[in-house]
C-alpha cells in the first residue's frame, strides 16, 4: 500500500478534509525514546470520535487526521528506562498519550482530566507534533499511557475496552454501581451501552435496557441477558418504571428528554451521562424530589483502565464486535452513524497492511 507521499515509516489511512473520506497515507512516527514503547498495531476499534474529527464537527480538526483511539498490539521496542514492558507483550493504547504528569489529576492517576492532556489523535503533543491514531501500522507512546493486556485476552476484543469499555466502567465503579442485587438502567444499546449491560450483569445487577427501537428487545434480553427492556418512547412503559432503579448509565448521544429517566430512579438514585447530546434539560423537580444525583463522566485514568482490563480478563467479559479491514472503513463509519453495527467495529490492522 502506498500513501499520499509514499514516504514514512508508518502506513495509515487519513482524512484530508471535512468530507471525512479516508484513504491511504504514510508518515513518520518518532523514534522510540528512553521512556517510550513502540508497538505494532494489530487491531483498532472504531469510535464515534473518529467521525467527529475526520469530519471536523468540532471545527478543530488538523488535517490530515489519522483517527483511532482503541488500539491493541504487540510491543516491538522499549526505551532504556522502561521496566514494565518487554518486546512481545500484548498491550493497548486508549484515548490519550500524554499529560503533564505533575498536577493533582496526574498524581491521582486521573490523567484524562489533566489540563495538559494530549489525545491520541488530533492533539498537539509536547514536541509540537499533531498526534495520529490507530488507523495505522504502528505507534510510539510513553510507557505511562500503555496498558498490559493479559495474554489470554484476545486483542481484537480488548480494543473496544480502551474507550467504550472504560467510559462506562469508570463511572460505574466510582458511583458504586457494582453492588449485587441493585437495579441498573442502561439508556441506549450501542458500543457503550452494550458494555454497560455486560458490566452490570458481571456485577450482579438487575439490568433494564431503555431503547427507542423495539427491534433491540431480543438482543438485549436473550443475548446480553438484561432482565427487562423498555421502549423509551412509550409513555406508559416509562411511567411503569418510575421509582424502580438504583442507577442509570446514559449512553445516548442524540438529544433526548431526561425527566422520564430521572423519574425511574429511587430515592438517592444516581444517573450518569457518558455521551454528548446537544443539550441537557430537565426539571429541578426530577432531581430534587427524591434527592437524586445527575453526574457526567468521560473515560478513565491509567489506574482505572488497568483495573478494567484485569477485570474483563478475569470475568471473561468480551465486547460484541464486527471485524473489518481498513479498506471498508468509509462504509463502516456511515453504518455507525446509522447505528447499523452490533456493537463495535474493529479494524484488523495487521492483515489490512500486508
Image: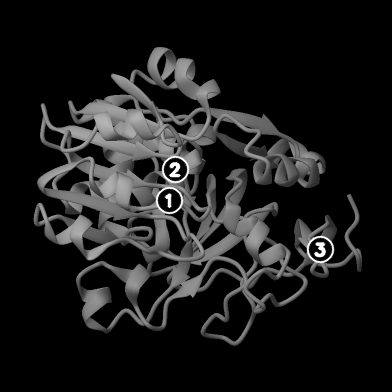
Residue 184 percent across, percent down from the top left: 23, 35
Q: Nearer the viewer, residue 62 or 221?
A: 221
Q: Residue, x 83% and y 68% (percent of image)?
A: 16
Q: Which residue is mark 2?
A: 192
Residue 335 percent across, percent down from the top left: 71, 39
Q: Is residue 190 left or right of residue 262?
A: right
Picture disc at residue 337 = none
Task: Identify the element where label 3 is drawn.
Answer: strand
Q: Which residue is mark 3?
A: 26
Q: Is residue 173 above or below residue 119?
A: above
What is the CA distance from the residue labelled 2 to the residue labelled 3? 31 Å
Please identify, in this view, whether the residue under mark 2 or under mark 1 is nearer the observer: 2
Task: Identify the element where label 1 is drawn.
Answer: loop
Image quarter (top left, top right, bottom left or bottom right) of the C terminus: top right
**Mark 1 nearby-residue class (10 Å; few <14, some 14–19, many ≥20):** some
Cβ atoms under marks 2 and 1 closer than 8 Å: no
What is the CA distance from the residue labelled 3 to the residue labelled 1? 27 Å
What is the CA distance from the residue labelled 2 to the residue labelled 1? 31 Å
Q: Nearer the viewer, residue 292 or 263?
A: 263
Mark positioned earlier in the residue sequence (2 or 3): 3
Q: Nearer the viewer, residue 217 or 74?
A: 217
Q: Residue, x 56% and y 53% (percent of image)?
A: 39
Q: How is the image coloured?
A: one colour
Residue 32 percent across, percent down from the top left: 56, 68
- Viewer can see residue 89: no
Mark positioned earlier in the residue sequence (3 or 1): 3
Task: Identify the element where label 2 is drawn.
Answer: helix
Q: Residue, x 61% and y 46% (percent of image)?
A: 46
Q: Which residue is mark 1?
A: 86
Q: Is residue 306 left or right of residue 29?
A: left
Q: Is residue 283 above or below residue 167?
A: below
Residue 244 percent across, percent down from the top left: 17, 33
Amino acid at each position: 500500500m502506498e500513501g499520499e507521499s509514499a514516504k514514512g515509516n508508518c502506513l495509515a489511512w487519513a482524512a484530508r478534509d471535512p468530507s471525512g473520506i479516508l484513504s491511504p497515507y504514510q508518515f513518520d512516527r518518532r523514534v522510540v525514546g528512553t521512556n517510550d514503547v513502540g508497538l505494532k498495531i494489530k487491531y483498532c476499534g472504531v469510535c464515534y470520535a473518529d467521525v467527529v474529527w475526520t469530519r471536523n464537527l468540532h471545527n478543530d480538526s488538523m488535517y490530515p487526521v489519522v483517527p483511532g483511539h482503541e488500539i491493541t498490539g504487540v510491543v516491538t521496542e522499549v526505551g532504556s528506562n522502561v521496566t514494565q514492558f518487554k518486546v512481545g507483550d500484548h498491550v493497548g493504547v486508549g484515548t490519550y498519550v500524554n499529560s503533564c504528569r505533575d498536577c493533582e489529576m496526574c498524581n491521582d492517576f486521573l490523567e484524562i482530566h489533566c489540563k495538559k492532556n494530549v489525545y491520541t489523535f488530533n492533539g498537539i503533543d509536547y514536541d509540537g507534533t499533531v498526534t495520529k491514531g490507530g488507523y495505522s501500522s504502528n505507534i510510539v507512546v510513553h510507557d505511562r499511557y500503555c496498558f498490559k493486556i493479559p495474554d489470554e485476552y484476545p486483542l481484537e476484543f480488548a480494543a473496544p475496552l480502551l474507550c467504550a469499555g472504560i467510559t462506562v466502567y469508570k463511572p460505574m465503579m466510582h458511583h458504586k454501581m457494582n453492588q449485587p442485587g441493585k437495579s441498573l438502567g442502561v439508556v441506549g444499546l450501542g458500543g457503550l451501552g452494550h458494555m454497560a449491560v455486560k458490566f452490570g450483569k458481571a456485577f450482579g445487577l438487575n439490568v433494564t435496557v431503555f431503547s427507542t427501537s423495539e427491534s433491540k428487545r431480543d438482543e438485549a434480553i436473550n443475548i446480553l441477558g438484561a432482565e427487562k427492556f423498555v421502549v423509551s418512547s412509550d409513555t406508559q412503559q416509562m411511567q411503569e418504571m418510575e421509582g424502580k432503579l438504583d442507577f442509570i448509565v446514559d449512553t445516548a448521544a442524540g438529544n433526548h428528554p431526561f425527566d422520564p429517566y430521572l423519574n425511574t430512579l429511587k430515592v438517592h438514585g444516581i444517573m450518569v451521562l457518558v455521551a454528548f447530546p446537544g443539550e441537557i434539560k430537565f426539571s429541578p423537580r426530577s432531581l430534587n424530589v427524591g434527592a437524586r444525583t445527575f453526574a457526567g463522566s468521560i473515560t478513565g485514568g491509567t489506574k482505572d483502565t488497568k483495573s478494567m482490563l484485569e477485570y474483563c480478563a478475569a470475568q471473561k467479559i468480551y465486547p460484541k464486535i464486527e471485524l473489518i479491514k481498513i479498506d471498508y472503513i468509509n462504509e463502516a463509519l456511515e453504518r455507525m452513524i446509522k447505528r447499523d453495527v452490533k456493537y463495535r467495529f474493529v479494524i484488523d490492522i495487521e492483515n489490512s497492511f500486508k
